[in-house]
Amino acid sequence: MAGHIPVMSSEVMEWLAVRPDGFYWDGTFGRGGHSRSILDSLSQQGRLWATDRDEAAQAEAGRINDRRFTFKRADLLAALDLLPSGMDGFLWDLGVSTPQLTTPQRGFSFQENGPLDMRMDQSEGETAGELINRLQEKELADLIYTFGEERLSRRIARMICEARKQDSQWTTHRLAEICTRAYPRRHHRIHPATRTFQALRIAVNDELNQIETVLPLALNRLNPSGRAVVISFHSLEDRIVKHTFKAFVAHGFRILTKRPLQANEDERAVNAASRSAKLRAIERGAP
């Protein structure tokens, strides 16, 4: 787990309020920081299941030798078919882990040059490079605008399509350079490639559809007084979580966080990944 700091760990444990003998699900194991904290709060009768689609997460989970712990390699949707019925709580940390961002072969970051992959599970599916080679210009522009909220999506898509006529092989630095050229020459609050990379990652991994589909199903799996804690990292994710939680108030749930919680100043100073994190929590009513 070197190099990766779990985001808002103390807040997660506060709002998850782990029952020592309970059953919990960490749906986004990552490098296991949150799972280890949950295990520390469980008695010998407690149980924790963790899932993740990333092969590196599976390798990290293999380091945990604890009979209370079970890991399954699966995305959120597939995990529901594997989980025992009834949970006392679950956690989703929807961010990309630091090792994913800093491993060039994964292709998530424009800071590191590597193949434009972006798949959470590299054993299957279409890479980001294959996706931008397949889409028509308008489709690509719409994707970058919808998932990245990028106002220059049409210009970026046009430049990508012009570039792929010359060379269909994509690296992270090549795409980032195109995004940079698409922007006017002035100071940028964020890197010009940020929103395009976000959009492609969301599309490649079907992230928003997974959240929108699975979150209601998972909430219905909670036992009475069970809690869910979800950490999101951009407005599209947070909007889905917010609206889903609000809808479940009519079904006897209680929203615990009236506004999304953010990392404190001390954490933001030492953990850059926490700066855009928003945590929401909800509890199922007692019987």
Image (spheres, rainbow, N blue to C red):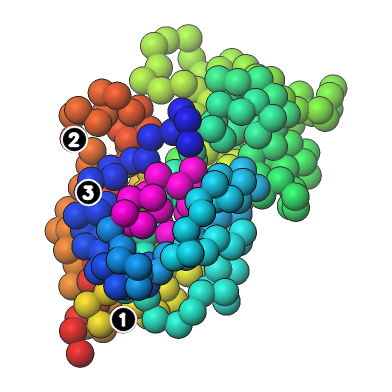
Residue range of the region highlighted in magenta in the rendering: 26-40
The label shown at residue 223 is 1
Task: Say if 66 sits above or below 34 in the image.
Answer: below
- Report whether 88 appears left or right of 165: left
Residue to which mark 3 is pinned: 11
In reply to whether residue 30 is colored magenta, the answer given is yes
From the top left corner, tell me how far across and down residue 223 is, in percent: 31, 81
- From the top left corner, tell me how far across and down residue 160 is, in percent: 70, 29
**Label 2: which residue?**
264
Q: Quadrant of residue 282?
A: bottom left
- Kindly report the distance in space between the C-alpha atoms of the residues bearing marks 3 and 1: 21 Å
Q: Amino acid at mark 3?
A: Glu
Residue 168's place in the image compared with 258, above or below, is above
Find out whether residue 193 is within the magenta segment.
no
* 181 on left or right of 262: right
- Disc 3 versus disc 2: nearer the observer: 3
